[in-house]
Image (cartoon, rainbow, N blue to C red):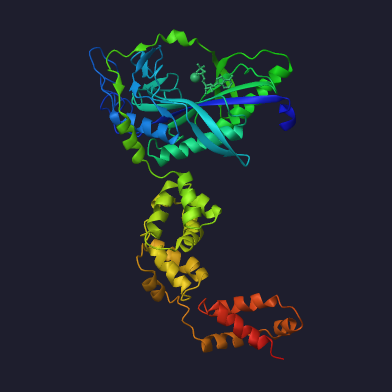
Amino acid sequence: MLEQTSGYEVVIGLEVHAQLQTRSKLFCGDGTSYGTPPNTAISPITLGHPGTLPRMNSKAVEHAIRMGLVCHCDISHYNYFARKNYFYPDLPKGYQVSQHTTPICNNGFVKIKAAGKEKKVSLTRIHMEEDAGKSMHDEGGDVTLLDYNRAGTPLIEIVTEPVMNTAEEASAFLTEIRKLVRWIGACDGNMEEGSLRCDANISVRKKGEAKLGTKVEVKNLNSIRNLRKAIEFESARLIDILKNDGKVDQETRSFNADDDTTFSIRTKEDADDYRYFPEPDLSPFSFTQEYINELRAGLPALPEELFQKYTAEYGLPEYDAGILSDDKTLSDYFEKAVRGTKYYKGVANLLLGPVKSWLNDSTKDWSELQVDPAVWPKLVELIDSGKLSFSLAAQKLVPQLIEQNHADPVQLAKAMNLFQDANASDIQNWVEEVLNRMPEKVSEFKKGKKGLLGMFMGEVKKISKGKADPKITNDLLLEKLNQP
Ligand code: ADP
Ligand code: MG
């Protein structure tokens, strides 16, 4: 791949569509939930019957502005919608209502990390529009079925400048967008259901050339994997054309996930064909700086901010801070757990260690964790005081705390008989038992194989069922073993 691409530069710009999380559509009260029976959320407004009047959903506008703020955009105070006219079976009105020359957000950037390097991906704009219906080609035998439920669902389209150069950067960008829309609750980010989807614009030019090459646009990529595969395929195809002195056609293409290739669906139509004009049934809308400030003040702390706080204020290692600040449910849970305590590292160790393992084993995610977050600092206290070993806590107590949704680790540890309450004479007995059982190993140790200490420790731990304090066990073992 590397050899193949040397001498050429790939340029990528993305257009990401995100369905906004509103209960009703952008211009009427029809519901927006995914999977409702076909053509049941289609009032005459959705269908654009003559005489109907659209009304704007203010929640959608709020989501769009909040997303703009998170992406450092300039927010337009004055906005209007336009009609983009075209005929397509999934478009019942014959036009799509979209912002045209006045996107609600301009400029801005999103920070990504790819190949170990940070990069700011500049945005051109974020604009609002309504979604179209859905054509289903596979379910109706030899006819295409139409479901208009999706028509009129509010969308934002996030458009980047042509500033990415690899499939990895593009994937990192889309991953970051998915994280951000979920973080602020603007979109559920579910690519499988199509609530988040992406068009990739790709061109190739000779290295050092200032002018961008002719682009192709691959439509409707519905997973991060497919985005990556589509870019890899197109980059290689376009470079091949240039190498053979061919000419790239500006065209719209589609991705075939069966063999990770793309195919042409049409050559690019002229933008003027759409006959944009301001939507006459909706008045322009504007808002004040105070309103924008209010929305800004209501934004949750973002991953970057949390990372700063966790490293600087909580003193956590960057690794822990990175994981804790990557998932909003987890960081919310962690914040609740450490509230009013200083057990930042202790709680992080429990959450990122045994709790995470339990979730992985049960194929659950953080949102499914029921147990009261206040349990974890109590458990840290137990461990720190030496009453309970971390390994016993991790292996035995944590799974039970979660499964029983138990609020009191002290009580449960007692009931499970886990406390390191063995006294020195119990430990003395265990140590002797172990050493008596293994005379050969003892003499090997005495001849210098000091590494066996760990094995003896393990044996004592086993027969004591983890109740022997490791420090005392260690001391007693050495005392015995070092006797002539
Ligand atoms: P169109 O009018 O065809 O939709 P735009 O200029 O609005 O094109 O750009 C759409 C997207 O394509 C943007 O994300 C932009 O960054 C990207 N883009 C534009 N030109 C190129 C190019 N030559 N190579 C790669 N991406 C490009
Ligand atoms: Mg486009």
Residue drawn at x 74%, y 78% is 449
> Where in the figure is residue 405, as x and y percent of width and height?
36, 62
Residue drawn at x 72%, y 84% is 440
Q: Is residue 194 visible?
A: no
Q: From the image, which quarter does the C terminus lie in?
A: bottom right
Q: Is residue 455 above or below residue 151?
A: below
> Where in the figure is residue 310, as x and y percent of width and height?
48, 53
Depth check, front residue: 336 or 242: 336
- Classify residue 27 as left or right of residue 172: left
Q: Is residue 162 above or below residue 309?
A: above
Identity of the residue furthest to the bottom in this view = 484
> Where in the figure is residue 71, as x and y percent of width and height?
45, 34
- Classify residue 210 as left or right of residue 130: right
Q: Is residue 288 visible?
A: yes
Identity of the residue furthest to the right in this view = 447
- Classify residue 384 as left or right of residue 129: right
- Classify residue 348 as left or right of residue 444: left
Residue drawn at x 44%, y 51% is 364
Residue 49 occupies quadrant: top left
Residue 212 occupies quadrant: top right
Q: Is residue 52 above or below residue 419?
A: above
> Where in the figure is residue 392, as x and y percent of width and height?
50, 71
